[in-house]
Amino acid sequence: MRARAPASAANLGPGFDTLALALDRYVEVEVEPAGRLLVRAEGEGAELSDDASHLAARVAIDVAGTERLAITVRSQVPVARGLGSSAALAVAAAAAAGAADPLAVAARTDGHADNAAASTIGGLVAAARIHGRVHAVRLPLDVSLAFVAIVPDVVLSTSRARQVLPAQVSRESAAFNLSRLALLLAGLADSRLLLPEATEDRLHQDYRSPLFPAAPKLLASMSQAGALAVCWSGAGPTLLGICRGMETPAVEAAATVALADAGIRGEVLVLHPDLHGLVLDRDGSGRALEVGASETSP
C-alpha cells in the first residue's frame, strides 16, 4: 500500500505546540510484504539509514508486527528544518503499513500531535492531548494565502530547540500569546484581518533566535517586501512569510536576496495550504483517507 502525507508548519508564532498548517510538499511511503526488511529512500533524507533504525521502518514494523517488509520512501520535505518531516513520514508510514489510526501512531512515535494532525487531516488544525487522547480540529482557513518559506541549509533538531526554552513563563507572557493567537486565527480565516502583530510570540521564537542569529533580519526582509505577517516554522530554522497572492513574488524575491546577503546557503520556497492531508492509494487510483475531526492517541 502507498500513502502520501503533506509537510506542515507548526506554532505559526503564538500557537506553540497547538497550531499547525499542512503545506504542499509531500512524503510518500510504500510498504509491501517481502522476504526480509528492505528500506529504500529517495529525495530529501535519502542519506539517512536504510535499515530497521529508519523512522519509516520503525513505524511500519510496529504497525505490521513484522520486519518482512519492503519500504520505499520518497520525500520532498527537508529534514530537521521545521517543516514537519518526521511527523509526515510517521503518518505516511503508519497508513501504508495498514494502521487504523495513523494519527495516533504518528503522535506516539514522533511526539508532535500538532504536526501529525496537520499531515493527517490537512488544512489548518488545532491539536491537543485530552485524557491521553489526541483531539484534532480543522479550523477555518483563507485558502488564498500563500507562504514564502526561507529554508536555510542549517539543521536544527527539535530537541535542541526545546533545550533553550524556559521551564516557566510569566502570566504576562501567557496572556500576550493568547491575545496574539486569537488575532492569528481570525487573520488566517480571513486575510483581510491578518495583522503583522498576530504572529508575535513570547514563548519560543526569541529564545530560539540565538540558534539561528540571521532569523530577525530574514524575517524583516519579508515583512518589508509585503508579507502580511512573519514567523518561525515549528522549531525552525525555516522562516515563513504569510502573503496574499499578489505580494508573493515580491516577498519571494526579497527573501532570496536576504538569504544571499546573509551568506547562508539554502532555498526559498513558495508553498500553499494542502487541504487533503493523508491520501491512500491501494489500487493505483488514489483515495483520500476519511478522517474525522477527532482522533485518538494510544
Image (cartoon, rainbow, N blue to C red):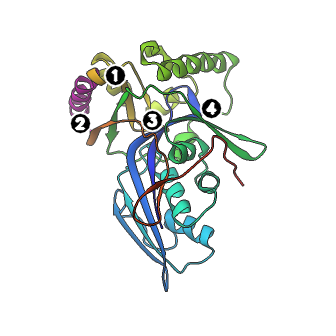
Residue 150 horizontal/vertical position (percent): 32, 35
Residue 17 drawn above or below residue 108: above
Dot 2 lies on which element?
Answer: loop
Of the numbered discs in the image, which one, if any, rests on residue 233?
A: 3
The residue labelled by disc 1 is: 244
Residue ID at (31%, 23%): 222
Q: Is residue 215 left or right of residue 184?
A: left
Disc 2 residue type (three-letter) = Gly
**From the viewer's perspective, is the residue at label 4 or at label 1 nearer?**
1
Quadrant position of residue 128 = top right
Disc 1 residue type (three-letter) = Arg
Q: Nearer the viewer, residue 66 or 281?
A: 281
Residue 249 horizontal/vertical position (percent): 23, 27
Residue 52 drawn above or below residue 127: below
Give the CA distance from mark 2 to mark 3.
Answer: 21 Å
Q: Which residues are magenta?
A: 247-264
